[in-house]
Amino acid sequence: MGVFPDEVILQILARLPVKSLFKAKTVCKLWYRLASDKYFIRLYNEVSVKNPMVLVEISDSTESKSSLICVDDLRGVSEFSLEFLKDRVKVRASCNGLLCCSSIPDKGVYYVCNPMTREFKLLPRSRERHVTRFYPDGEATLVGLACDLSRNKFNVVLAGYHRTFGHRPDGTFICLIYDSDSNKWRKFVSFQEDHFTHMNKNQVVYVKGALHWLTGSCSYILALDLDYEVWRKISLPDEVSYGTGNRVYLLELSGCLSLTQISDAWMKIWMIKDYEKEIWCMVDRVSIRCIKGLVPGIFPITQTGEYVFLATHKQVLVYHQRSKVWKEMYSVKNNATLPLWFSAHAFRSTIFPCD
């Protein structure tokens, strides 16, 4: 065991899948000690976040249960479940290895879990008065999860239009923020006039200490600064157009906000260079004529500087930017009740604790 320096062993262990890492910890006392150290946990998470994956919830039309598929460019496809929560849930948000899930049978119940380590936390119920509720269906319009690896904490955000019982909604936008350090919710009120599509809600991006959503009209990005509890509107690149065959999606790229615009023939990727001044630059322009038949139903899910993951109705594809090669990573073998893009989230496999 003394052949390699401790740092070399740490670098090797930091590149193992979580399950393999747990097995490696049982090899000897040295590996257990190294893999349990706070420095290693930080190193492992830093390495893992550079390898984004796609997490897809697969529902069979003949079954009431669903399974989760994780698609990794390096390791292929793996399957796991959230049965350890002992509840029927749906994934509402994903950030740095953690998932925020809402209970299907019990509205208002939320969990934060790490599906790799099977740790979870049942969030306390907020103290919202029962005479008010989210509009229109009792569930938050926006659900965001912010997992801060550097500060070892996370926040959950529930935001949406509220209405008092017996009254019409008046544009009041309620935001509830859960803080893992205090184990409490806090609340602030603002006024918004935005609407959000299903993909807008799924593609929430956490960068620069803020959560970001693209509005349904694709006119701007709505950002929530978690430290100062203020909403901010971020402009899109001047060249980005929405409608008439163009679709726009919000992603993250190397710790920065990124926009992907898909038209009939091209996929264009922008990244924000200056967050405060809202200066954007185009980083790639990809011809998608070779997959022309899939273009109307293709959706970008996550990306790095080397590849982009996209989901269709029944496939998960990856585009390698250096080789300019498209590859099918996963295909549904049965009759899924929903298209894959409907329940696809960006995911990273970390050992971030959530209990």
Image (cartoon, rainbow, N blue to C red):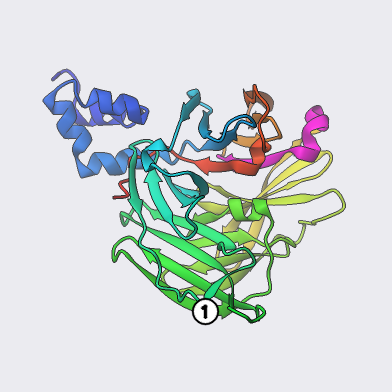
Image coords of residue 261 (percent x, y): 73, 48
Image coords of residue 87 (percent x, y): 43, 44
- Decide: is 151 above or below 313: below
Q: Looking at the image, which residue is at 49% across and 56% down? A: 206
Residue 1 shows in this picture:
yes
Question: Of 63 and 314, which appears nearest the observer?
Answer: 63
Question: Of 139 and 280, which appears nearest the observer?
Answer: 139
Please state, as top left, top right, bottom left or bottom right, where the N terminus lies in the image.
top left
Q: Quadrant of residue 46?
A: top left
Q: Looking at the image, which residue is at 47% across and 49% down? A: 101
Image coords of residue 291 (percent x, y): 78, 29
Question: Of 348 and 55, which appears nearest the observer?
Answer: 55
- Decide: is 153 above or below 325: below
* Category of crowding for the residue at label 1, using alpha-carbon neighbours closer than 10 angstroms: few (below 14), some (14–19), many (at least 20): some
- Decide: is 35 above or below 220: above
Q: Looking at the image, which residue is at 39% across and 64% down? A: 125
Q: Does the magenta stretch include residue 337?
A: no
| Region rendered in magenta | 289-304
Amino acid bearing label 1: Val
Is 242 displayed left or right of 250 in the figure?
right
Instruction: State the residue position of label 1.
Output: 189
